[in-house]
Image (cartoon, rainbow, N blue to C red):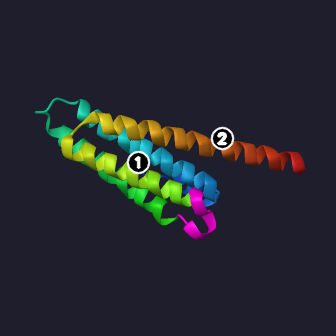
């Protein structure tokens, strides 16, 4: 793996700065999935492993930060019921992640991982359909 002077991967930075809003949402869901996976790996460690608490705390905290960012971008006036449904989903994910963090239980993490994965896949499929629709009209 290549180390970067400022700690940032220039390819990742370029991907983010050139991404469409929809692609950014998919990237954020990918981030949630990455950090939930870290938390789940922590839950799988033995209770006396010093890395267990650190991994769960970091994974949940970073997942919550991304979900908060997703929530902050919602526009309920323009998005209407769709935005409100996403807001409710994000609130639910946050509650389940906090439960996992407090109880050190994998079940809420597995649930969030499944739900976010489904939502992420739906967004990705929508973006593919949009790009196919544009390529047919060009």
Residue 50 spot, x, y in % from top left? 14, 39
Q: Is residue 125 left or right of residue 7?
A: right
Residue at (53, 38) in percent of width and height: 118
C-alpha gap between disc 2 and disc 1? 33 Å
Outermost residue to the left = 48
Q: Is residue 78 left or right of residue 49?
A: right
Residue at (53, 64) in percent of width and height: 74
Labelled disc at residue 3: 1
Outermost residue to the front = 81
Is residue 27 at least partly visible in the picture?
yes
Residue 26 spot, x, y in % from top left? 56, 48
Q: Does the CB distance between marks 2 and 1 fall below 8 Å? A: no
Residue 133 spot, x, y in % from top left? 81, 46
Circle 2 is placed at which residue position? 125
Name which of mark 2 and mark 1 comes first in the sequence.
1
Q: Secondary structure at mark 2?
A: helix
Residue 4 spot, x, y in % from top left? 43, 53
Position of the N terminus by quadrant: top left
Residue at (49, 39) in percent of width and height: 117
The secondary structure that dominates the magenta segment is: helix
* Magenta span of residues: 74-82
Is residue 11 at least partly visible in the picture?
no
Q: Nearer the viewer, residue 7 or 93?
A: 93
Residue at (45, 55) in percent of width and height: 88
Q: Secondary structure at mark 1?
A: loop
**Mark 2 crowd level (few <14, some 14–19, many ≥20, 10 Å Cα):** few
Hey, which quadrant is residue 20 in on the image? bottom right
Q: Nearer the viewer, residue 45 or 126?
A: 126
Q: Nearer the viewer, residue 27 or 84?
A: 84
Q: Is residue 77 left or right of residue 128?
A: left
């Amino acid at each position: 793996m290549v180390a970067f002077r400022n700690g940032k991967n220039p390819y990742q930075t370029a991907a983010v700065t050139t991404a469409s809003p929809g692609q950014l949402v998919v990237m954020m869901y990918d981030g949630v999935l990455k950090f939930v996976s870290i938390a789940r790996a922590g839950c799988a460690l033995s209770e006396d492993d010093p890395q267990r608490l650190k991994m769960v705390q970091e994974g949940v905290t970073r997942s919550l930060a991304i979900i908060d960012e997703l929530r902050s971008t919602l526009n309920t006036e323009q998005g209407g019921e769709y935005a409100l449904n996403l807001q409710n989903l994000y609130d639910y994910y946050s509650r389940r992640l906090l439960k996992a963090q407090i109880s050190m239980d994998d079940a809420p993490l597995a649930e969030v991982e499944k739900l976010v994965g489904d939502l992420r896949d739906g967004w990705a499929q929508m973006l593919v359909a949009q790009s196919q629709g544009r390529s047919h009209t060009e």
